[in-house]
Amino acid sequence: MTPELPRTPGPLPPVYVVAAALAEWALHAWLPIVQWLAWPWRWVGLLFVLKGLILAALGRWQYRRHRTSATPFTESDVLVTGGLFEWTRNPMYSGLLLALAGEALLFGSVGPWLVMPAIWLVFTHLFIRKEEAGMKLQFEQEYEEYCQRVKRWGVGK
């Protein structure tokens, strides 16, 4: 019998991403603080949004390709360590953060950037740490070795 995987009750990550995107918009509209990036430079944000969404989608696609679940707190059949997962243990979360950073760039004001630390904390504390605990229970030494090779958020071997 497999040990019980850690769980977080409540919404899944896409709900938090939509809430964060709306919060960025609201902060830009009502508390812009300072407009620091002018047009046409703000269009660079669109590249970040697209790259982030592609990164998240490719991470999810890799899970599907290995026929395992990408839904948080569900048991995985396989430890996916290739492709994007050679560079970051969390390409989907990283991609979503990149997309939100792109939205903040599109707005061009400081206010939306206040959301970034909050959503990073949500991802890290409500999801990633608990998912990692579940992966350690399920894959033991293989997962420990993977963590030694690849960083949680960034490029690393």
Image (cartoon, rainbow, N blue to C red):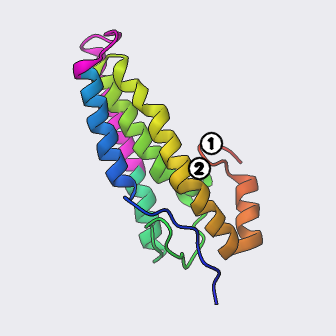
The image quadrant where one finds the N terminus is: bottom right
Query: Which residue is at the front of the view, 107 or 157?
Result: 107
The answer to whether residue 90 is above or below residue 133 is above
Q: Residue at x 63, y 61 (%)?
A: 132
Q: How dense is the environment of label 2, judged by Cα within 10 Å: few (below 14), some, or many (20 and up)?
A: many
Question: Is the residue under label 1 in contact with that under label 2 (CB below 8 Å)?
Answer: yes
Q: Residue at x 50, y 40 (%)?
A: 120
Q: Tell me the kind of residue under disc 1.
A: Val
Asked whether residue 41 is drawn in magenta, I would say yes
The answer, for residue 84, to whether it is visible in the render is no
**Residue 138 percent location from the top left of the image:** 66, 75
Q: Which residues are magenta?
A: 29-55
Quick check: 24 left or right of 81?
left
Q: How dense is the environment of label 1, judged by Cα within 10 Å: few (below 14), some, or many (20 and up)?
A: some
Specify the principal SS of the magenta part. Answer: helix
Kindly state the secondary structure of the residue where label 2 is placed.
loop
Residue at the disc numbered 2: 88
Query: Which residue is at the front of the view, 131 or 99?
Result: 131
The dot on residue 155 is 1
The answer to whether residue 106 is above or below residue 132 is above
**Residue 65 percent location from the top left of the image:** 44, 72
Q: Mark 2 and mark 1: span between their CA atoms?
A: 6 Å
**Residue 152 percent location from the top left of the image:** 62, 48
Q: Residue at x 69, y 68 (%)?
A: 136
